[in-house]
Amino acid sequence: MDVYEAVRSRRAVRGFTDRQVPREALVRVLSAAAWAPSGSNVQPWRAYVVTGGPLAELKRRAGERVAAADRWDEREYEMYPPVLKSPYHERRSAFGAERYSALGIAREDWEARQRAAAANWDCFGAPAALFCYIDRDMGRPQWSDVGMYLQTVMLLLRAEGLHSCPQMAWSVYRKTVAQILSPPDDLILFCGMSIGFEDATVSQPRTGRAPLDETVTFVDGC
């Protein structure tokens, strides 16, 4: 698979089979992803890969919190600005409408929307998950380094025939994740990532992208 195909075929998959992910494939991916760029080569990411019994236990505990309508853990960072201005607000709204429409969920059906969101904490059925942390002393440039690392991981997963779904949603159950992983106190959980083989029976429409002229300006003197 060439790089262009990996980029085009990568998407947030929200339906996985229970087929196990080979350990050697994950080792290859994460070994290669270590070459992702970072300012002054500080490599600010800290990843935990969870499978088998520990992942099943994490899903169980998270599921119990969902079923009990347990309050989310206090946020250690904001997922989005309090007010999203145009065009970002419209893009986010369009994504939500597209996703829930594909699931047959009406906009006003809040209960069904919550059930769909709860699938996050089952990793959408995936048999492997990655949890990415960053040292709380790091600044914005290092957070961007973590983003480049995660993108590299996701593209390499495509080369292995695997799919993924990055999930900031796990940050609101960070204390439950910490019960399983026991990360050092100086780390912040940025996101989880479900990893596995796509379940082709699950409808997963591809979200569109803005036209190039909305996001790119060529300055070439012509």
Image (cartoon, grey):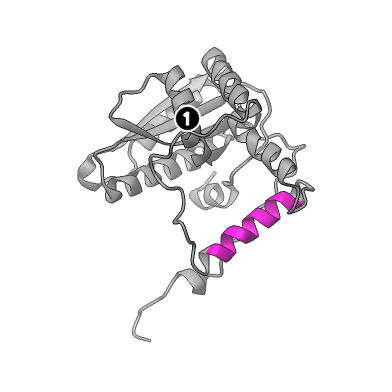
192 w.r.t. 51: above or below: below
Label 1 sits on residue: 130
Query: Is residue 13 something one can see in this rendering?
Result: yes
Q: Nearer the viewer, residue 14 or 181?
A: 181
Position of 194 with respect to 137 (left or right) is right
Which quadrant is the C terminus positioned in? bottom left
Position of 138 with respect to 89 (left or right) is left
Residue at x 42%, y 20% (from the top left corner) = 181
Name the residue at the top extreme.
53
Position of 207 with respect to 109 (left or right) is left
Name the residue at the bottom extreme.
222
x and y percentages locating residue 141 in the rendered image: 28, 50
Residue at x 55%, y 63% (from the top left corner) = 89
Quarter of the image holding residue 146?
top left
Query: Is residue 207 something one can see in this rendering?
Result: no
In magenta segment, residue 98: yes
Residue at x 49%, y 43% (from the top left corner) = 155
In magenta segment, residue 19: no
Q: Nearer the viewer, residue 172 or 19?
A: 172
Number of numbered markers: 1
x and y percentages locating residue 17 in the rendered image: 68, 28
Q: Nearer the viewer, residue 11 or 8?
A: 11
Mark 1 packing: few (<14 Cα in 10 Å), some, or many (20+)?
many
The magenta segment is: 89-101
206 w.r.t. 197: above or below: below
